Amino acid sequence: MELDEDTLSAFWSKDSNGRPEFFIINEALLSKLCILGDDNEPCFEGS
């Protein structure tokens, strides 16, 4: 998955020590999304 930087609205959540904990994405346009799983046919044979 790739996020378009021009439309990205996000920030890092910090723990009690001020270190980054996880990334919160509020809004963004997605491109090149890949869905994995047994019920989805791969784009390329053998993937």
Image: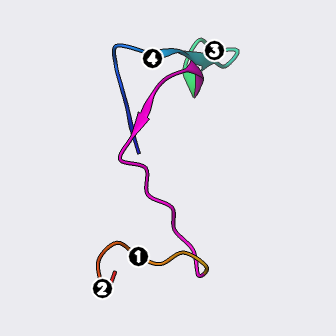
Q: Which mark is residue 17?
A: 3
- At 54% across and 75% down in the image, what residue appears? 40
| Amino acid type shown at disc 2 | Glu
Give the residues in magenta.
23-38
Q: How many marks?
A: 4
Residue type at mark 1? Pro
> Closer to us: mark 1 or mark 3?
1
The image shows residue 7, relative to residue 47, as above or below, that is above
Q: CA distance from mark 1 to mark 4?
A: 28 Å
Residue labelled with disc 4: 8
- In front of the other: label 2 or label 3? 2
Q: Earlier in the sequence, mark 2 or mark 4?
A: 4
| SS class, disc 1 | loop
Q: Residues within 10 Å of mark 3 (few under 14, many from 20)?
A: few
Q: Give the secondary structure at mark 4.
A: loop
Does label 4 or label 3 sit earlier along the sequence?
4
